[in-house]
Amino acid sequence: VRSLCLILFDLNGMKRVNDTWGHLAGDRLLRDFASLLRETMPPTAKLYRYGGDEFIAALHEVSLSDVKKCQQKLEQRAAWGHAFFNPETDHGLSEIVKRADGMLYAMKRAMKQAAENAS
């Protein structure tokens, strides 16, 4: 692998949708977000539902600026974190996922803090 970036996405407000309008509405939200991912990500991206309301995109041969462009189109709908494969330190995908997950949860904390400060 010469260049690989994994982006983790976690839908914003999924619990609220399920609690307010039911799980069928939540399922529809998941399908809509999957469609949005397909439209937003480069055609060569591999897209997966990672679990619950999380998705993962695997992008090959992209730059940080390419990744940020993809993320900006989705930032109102999902928190995200990304990590690039480092051949010198990464021995498996789990290490890349762990770094991306750490970035995702840092973003979620920052979003929650900003919402609390705005209240």
Image (cartoon, grey):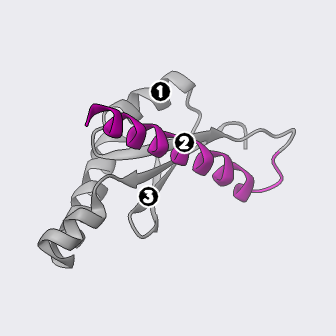
Residue 80 is covered by the magenta coloring: no
Q: Which amino acid type is shown beneath numbered disc 2?
A: Ala
State the image quarter where residue 27 is shown: bottom left
Residue 117 is covered by the magenta coloring: yes
Question: Which of 60/113 is in front?
Answer: 113
Residue 106 circle label = 2
What is the residue that sits farthest to the bottom in this orientation? 23
Q: Residue at x 48, y 44 (%)?
A: 109
Identify the residue position indicated by label 1 in the image.
66
Q: Which amino acid type is shown beneath numbered disc 3?
A: Phe
Gap in Å between the C-alphas at discs 3 and 2? 17 Å
Magenta segment, prevailing SS (helix, strand or loop): helix
Q: Residue at x 41, y 54 (%)?
A: 10
From this view, report whether residue 70 is shown above or below residue 101.
above
Q: Please give the range of residues in magenta.
A: 90-119
Classed neighbour count for the residue bearing mark 1: other residues with Cα under 10 Å, few (<14), some (14–19), many (≥20) = few
Label 2 secondary element: helix
Residue 7 in the image: state x and y as whole percent.
52, 45
Identify the residue position indicated by label 3 in the image.
55
Mark with earlier residue (3, 1): 3
Label 1 secondary element: helix
Gap in Å between the C-alphas at discs 2 and 1? 21 Å
Q: Is residue 106 left or right of residue 95?
A: left
What is the residue that sits farthest to the right in this orientation? 88
Which numbered mark, 3 or 2, is in the foreground of this view? 2
Mark with earlier residue (3, 2): 3
